[in-house]
Every structure is written in structure tokens, then in C-alpha cells.
Amino acid sequence: MNETAAEREKRKVVIGLAQINNSFSGQNYLPYSVGVLQSYVDHNAPDPGRYEFLPPLFKRIRISEAVEHLIQADIVGLSTYVWNANISLEIARRLKARRPDILVVFGGPHVPDQPDEFLRLHRNDIDLCVHNEGEQTFLKILEEYPGRNWSRLNGISFLDGDGTLIKTPNVERLRDLSIIPSPFLDGHFDQLIAANPGETWIGLWETNRGCPFQCTYCDWGSSTSAKVNQFDINRLKQELEWFATHHIEFIFCCDANFGILKRDVDLAHHAAEVKRRTGYPRSLSVQNTKNATDRAYETQKILSDAGLSKGVALSMQSLDRQALVNIKRDNVSLDTYMELQRRFTEDGVETFSDLILALPGETYESFVAGVGNLIESGQHNRIQFNNLTILPNAEMAGAAYRAEFGLGTIESIIVNTHGSREVTEDDVPEYQEMVVSTASLPPEDWCRVRVFSWMTALTHFDKLLQIPFIVANQVGGMPYRHLIEGFVAVDGASYPVLGSIRDFFLDEAKRIQSGNPEYVYSEDWLGIYWPADEYIFIKLTAENNMDGFYQESFRLIANLLESRGIHLPEGVLKDALALNRALMKQPNVCDDLVLDLGYDLADFHRRTLKGQHPTLKAVKTQVRIDRSSKTWPDFQVWCQEVVWWGNKKGAYLYGANVLDRRPSGHH
């Protein structure tokens, strides 16, 4: 028997919430966004007892299971972004097909600011879209239900009965965040954890809202405006205690600019103290504030000293001034990043730099020059080369912006680096819009930039040739970019191993341009997606081709130096390659190795990585490579622990001790 409106008024309103995230190594994110929605309703509704919340959906499961879970709800709220947009839409479609009376509400960053086309495309599946912050708006939707006079609510859009778009004025942003309760401290996540005893959780932690920057590829600053509003520090310290009590090993801080507020230093200290006292969290990942050099340094140094940081991200995005102007990032000081890199390097704190491929106005020449300058300035740990993607509400997504800079894009299936294929029989793939050419970077140049980036990662940052590269640069004056470009331009007939690597990178770049995933899947090696450079590192090892790689690299580097009239001291290049080869962590190796060298190369390399500018000394040096303290008899374990886990810290090299040092006959 169908329920009457009066009967519906009397009973509880059942609410289903979904914030579907990808899983990483068997770990799942606590669904913070929908947790906040539920907490806000519980604390601020006139009659919270009127509402009954189903347990939230927090990970990708079979769509049929998700629908069965939500089908009993009166109202379903889905928090959406690029990684869950399609599965959320498919859940909504199936729910409405079975129960047209369910009220389906879409929120989150994926809801377009201009929703007309989106709502018309999904008019049978979505009733309401919520724009910007959703806490206040969602409660007002619940309070209006079962009535449907939506036009009197702010912050929403919908199609009315005759198909006319109704978009009400946005709700003013919350300035006082104290009205938003903590889903950690009020027990909501305790219930979720208790109901899922087999899960390992990742914490999402929000200490402030807002971003003062307006980068055109990002929808953060545009959606939150310049003002940064902050949660109470005592609440945040209590949340850190909650994470520790619940043994949350990894916390991802959602702030756009951690360190932008003076009190962030205090928060970093408290996180360090909680870890010292409890052992948790193991890691706290933050995104640095821009420009505030001293505070960014202080907060990151605290986190690093406490072992909470795997490496400090210095997100430059580009070193080209015009590209930075085009993405409205010219107010971010490159000098700040260079100074931070220098200070962290001196203190032994690993940094990695972020660069984005194909930013508007960037050319092959400007990009490659920027990479070279970054390495010359002392970045020897890692540059993360990120492909540019367009988010729905970023300024870059606008038609005028696309036309001005000639953005050529493809739809690319979303896969995570070091992620596995978690596909259920009724799953739907998620897609991102990736930029694969611009007016200043035509398609063939995008491929060149992508190949150059992978070759840089393989040779210098995966450490396979870092020592000879540093020697060629520091002693011979050979620019890093010319070394790397030499490996890209190699003649495959004369250098078959190096040529096959270059060809593989080129094929992968073209595959990406045609819509294939941006990472390389390997069923044999952990069944995960690898960055192309790491895939080659593993392939060289698996096929016992490492010696061939080093033999060809010796010939090529020697020829590159000779072509530029550079003459290194006798034997130093051979020694540099021998030391580098011996230092690479490899599977099935358990004996220490003693090398006799004609130069103090181990010390020279170590001091260079510390940001010093040492002089290479011609001294006969005996070096013991410690290959017995930690061994990898299992190839799959080596893939995981060395190639994957070593990425951020660049931890690919064995330890080395100098046993003997005496003057050499070299001059």
C-alpha cells in the first residue's frame, strides 16, 4: 500500500549518503564530507530525531550493492568529484529507475557552477544540485522535505516541471566555522569504524577553509574566495588525539595552504608530540602555503623531524614566467621555492618539486630549460611531472580560456599511480579531461616533453645515472638538460638498450594522447599501474639488462661530452658509472661489495646532495657497499619496497662506507 503524505510526515526521514573514494593498498578514506553533513544535521536540526541516517558508502563496491543499500532511503546525497562522478551518476540512475520518488541530491566540487547542461543530461536521475559549501543548504533541503518548494532555498539548482532551469543565489560562505561540528569528536566515525572492523582507514583533516590564490587549473580559490577561515585550534588538537586513539596511520590534510596561519606551527608541534607519545599518526601529508617562506619551512621541518613527512612538496608547477602569468600564479614567488629547497637540503630534509606538463604558454624549450635549472639549483631527490587535467569549475574549463590558449584535450580513464585494477562486474570507469597539446606546445612537442620527463625521472631521480650526471655537470660543466636530451635523441642502432627505452617512452606518450591511461599496468609486477620510468627500471632488472644499460650509458655520456669539447679527468666517468651501478638496490643480492676507485666519488655525491659544492678529489678510495643489511630475495617484494616505496625519498641506493683513502696518481 502506498504511503500517504500524512503518514510520511509522521515517520522518520531516512537519509543515505555516499562519498565514494578509491582505495589505496587496502586502505580507505574516512568519508569526511558526508560525515560533516550528518554531524551538522544532528547538531543544528530543530528536531534531529526526525532523521535516520544509513551508514555512509565510502568506497567503490558493486553498483547493485550500493543501490540495494540506498534504496530504502527517502533522500540520497552524493558527494562528487572526478574520481567518483560516473559511479555516483550510475547509482542515481538505477535508484530513480526503481524508485522515482527518492530525492537525489548531488553536491561536491564536481557539480558545475553553470549546471544547465549537466541537469538536462541527467534530468531523470538528479533532483537537486547543491553549490559550494553544503552543510547549511543540505539541512534546509531536509527541513523542506517532503514538500518540494525548492525555489525558496539558496545555494541550489534544479529543473522545474516544464524543464526551466532554476538556480538560486549561492549561500554566503561560512565565516564562523564553529557552527560545524566535528564528525570525529561526536562519534559518527566511531560507529563506522566499529561496523567495518576489517578496514584500515586514512584520515581526511580540515583545519581551515579558503584559498587566496586563483590558479586557473584549480577550482579551490575560485570556489572558496580569498578569505581563509579557520576551525578552532583546541578542536583540531582533540581531533589529532582522536586519530591517535583510533590508530589512524595516515592523515591527508585538506587545506590548500598549510602554514598560511601562524597557529599552524603550533598544530605541527602538537601533531609531532602526539606521534612521539602514541606512535600515531605515522604520516601527515600537507600542502604547503605559498610565499610564506619562514613559516612553510618551520612547519615542514617540525613534521619532517617527527617522521611525519616523507618529503616536502615544493609545488612550483612551472619555472616559465609567462606560463605562470597565464595560470594566474605569477604572484607565487619562485624565489620562495628556491630558498626553501636550499634550506631543506642543507638540513637533510628531502624535497620533491611539482611541475605540470602543458601549462598554457609553456613551450618545449621553456619546460626543458626549467627542469635543467631546477636540477642545477640542487633538486636531486625528485621532480614529480604531472599531466595537466581540467576540472569542471576551474577557470581553465571555460570556452574562452580554452580558445585563447588552444587547449587540446582527451578523455582519459582515471587510474592511480601504484593503484590496482579494482573493477567489479558492473563498475563504470571514471574519466579525466587531460590536456595533450596547446597553442604553444603542439601534439608532437607534448610527446617530446613527456618523453623528456620520463627520461629525466629514470636517469636522474630513480638514481640510475645520477652520479655520472652530477660529475659531468659539476666537473665538466655539461648542462643536465643536454645529458638527458642526449638519451632521448639516442641512435637505437648503436645503442639498442637505450633506444628501446626511448621508443617505449615515445609509444607510451602517443598512447596517452589517444586516450589510454597515464600509467603502465603490469600483471606480473604486483598487478598495479607504474609510472613509465619505474616500469623500465623494473624491466631492466627483470630481464638482466642492467649491465647492458650501463655499458651503453658509458659510451653515450662519453660521446656527449666529447661532442661539446668536455674532457673529464682520466677514469672518472668509468668510476662514476661503476659506483652508481654497485649502489643500485637489486633483488637477490646479499653480499657486500668493495670497490676500488680513483676519486672520492662517494663523498662527492653525498655532499652534492646536501647542497654543498664540493671539489672532486683524485684520491684512491676503497668503498664498501652495504648490500647485506637489507636484502630482497623476492622480486615482488623488491618491486614494492624499493621501486614503489622508495619513490618520494629517492631511496634506491645502498649505503656506502669509505674504508681507505690515499692520494692518487690522477691529475
Image (cartoon, helix red, strand yellow):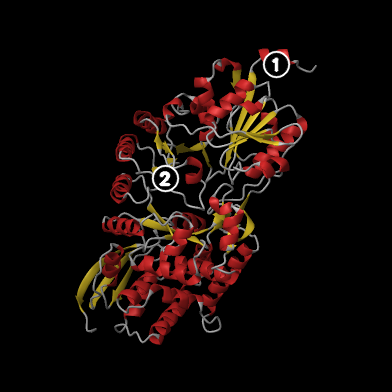
Q: Name the residue type under label 1.
A: Arg
Q: Which residue is mark 2?
A: 212
Q: Quadrant of residue 207?
A: top left
Is residue 521 visible to us here? no
For mark 1, give the secondary structure. Answer: helix
- Asked if residue 56 lies left or right of residue 344, the reply is right
**Is 472 rendered above or below residue 212?**
below
**Is 374 rendered above or below residue 644?**
below
**Is 141 rendered above or below residue 335?**
above
Q: Which mark is residue 480?
A: none
The image shows residue 368 at horizontal and vertical percentages of 45, 70
Name the residue furthest right.
1
Q: Name the residue type under label 2.
A: Pro
Looking at the rendered image, the quarter that the C terminus falls into is: bottom left
* Of pointers 1 and 2, the one earlier in the residue sequence: 1
Name the residue furthest left.
663
Q: Which residue is mark 1?
A: 8
Out of 5 and 86, give the one closest to the viewer: 5
Write the residue at 77% across / 34% down. Answer: 162
Is residue 301 visible to us here? yes
Query: Mark 2 Cα within 10 Å, few/some/many (few <14, many 20+)?
Result: some
